[in-house]
Amino acid sequence: MTKDLIIIGSTGSIGKSTLNIIKKNKKKFKIKLLTTNTNIQQIFKQALEFKVKKVVINDRKNFLKFSNLFKKKRIKVYFNIDNALKQIKKKVYFTVSAISGIEGLEPTLSVIRYTKNLGIANKESIICGWKILVKELRKYNTNFIPLDSEHFSVWSIIKDENKKNIKKIYLTASGGPFLKKKLNNIKNVKPKFALRHPNWKMGKKISIDSATMMNKIFEVIEAKKIFNISQSAFGILIHPTSYVHAVVHFKTGLTKFLAHDTTMEIPIINSLHEKNENFFYNNNEFDFLKLNKLTFLKPDIKNFPLLKILKYRFEDTYFEIILVSLNDALVRKYLEKSINYISIHQLLLKLLKNPYFTKYYKFSPKNINEIKNMVNKVNKFLNEYLKKND
């Protein structure tokens, strides 16, 4: 039986990984909808290759400019994802939510009612809107699967376990491109060097987050929410080869870990197939040599000072939204070369303590509009702050 899919953010790294899997299994899957923001050439090629009849271009200028290009190939183009989803009469089997940044939350919420299974690779959606997401997932009886390699690994390890028996869960980090360098020695490092992740091919924003270790902090927040386990149960270990993605230590004395090659295709393909379904991933063989000389290290807070953020409590308040928004903006400023590398760390830690933000930490957003309003407040405040302190 053919499984219908939706890919939100098909031109990003996760979207491309999903399509690489579909390319090898075209008889098993049919794509109903693809979305992008500005990568028109890429989504046009994808739509033609996979015979997709509906696409969303979530950028008005590009939507107006290129609509006719798609229409000539009898591909229906939408500017608004809600309008595209309304044309889907029957729930699709699986949706991959792969838009990076807080912008991914709204379309993720929109698609829930139209899909049986939702795989999320968008950290910000989970961090900022988990309560709202869970409400919608329950309302429409939609199954949720975390697609990030670390969370998929934890999910795989503990799904048949009693959570009361879990003593510690470690998420692994590669250490990024600056693992062996002191922070003071790279305070002015250029973005092109920070983008050189040693193991993964990722987008620019997440690559910078990996270098600063912010990505792993986000993953701890995600894991706490997804698995509903005490924050104190989570830890971070540096594992430079990125072969082991999560380690779970149980009160029974057992320790389990999940390992796979450094490709997002593996958690994605395992999510797309049902439990008892037979499938192969590249007919790969077990490479036992990769388990030899496994190295795990505790991260040094001097080199990764953003780890201090783990001292905060993550209770589904405006704190998480402010954290994500500040980091997004600071990374964007760094990539634009408006600030230097060390400023990401210094400004983020400093601004989280600013009274303008701390007054919101006791309150929680009730809906998507309140989240969007806070994101706008953060961006406005940061722009004014940087102007004053330039």
Image (tube, rainbow, N blue to C red):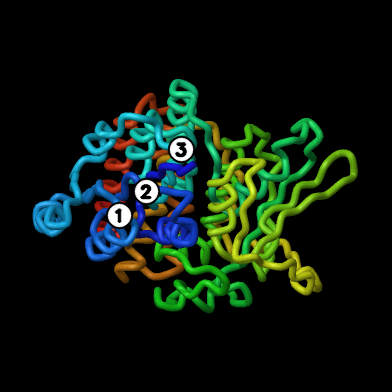
**Amino acid at dot 1:** Lys
Q: Which residue is mark 3?
A: 93
SS for dot 1: loop
Q: Find the distance from the CA under tag 2 to the CA under tag 3.
A: 10 Å
Q: Which residue is mark 2?
A: 31
Which residue is painted at 60% across and 41% down in the image? 274
Give how far across and how far down residue 314 sits, in percent. 55, 37
Q: Give the farthest residue toward the right.
A: 253
Give how far across and how far down residue 47 sits, in percent. 28, 57
Q: Which residue is mark 1?
A: 51
Instruction: Choose between 156 and 374: the one closer to the eye.
Output: 156
Q: Earlier in the sequence, mark 2 or mark 3?
A: 2
Q: Earlier in the sequence, mark 1 or mark 2?
A: 2
Q: Earlier in the sequence, mark 3 or mark 1?
A: 1
Q: CB of mark 1 within 8 Å of CB of mark 2?
A: yes
Image check: 201 left or right of 163? left
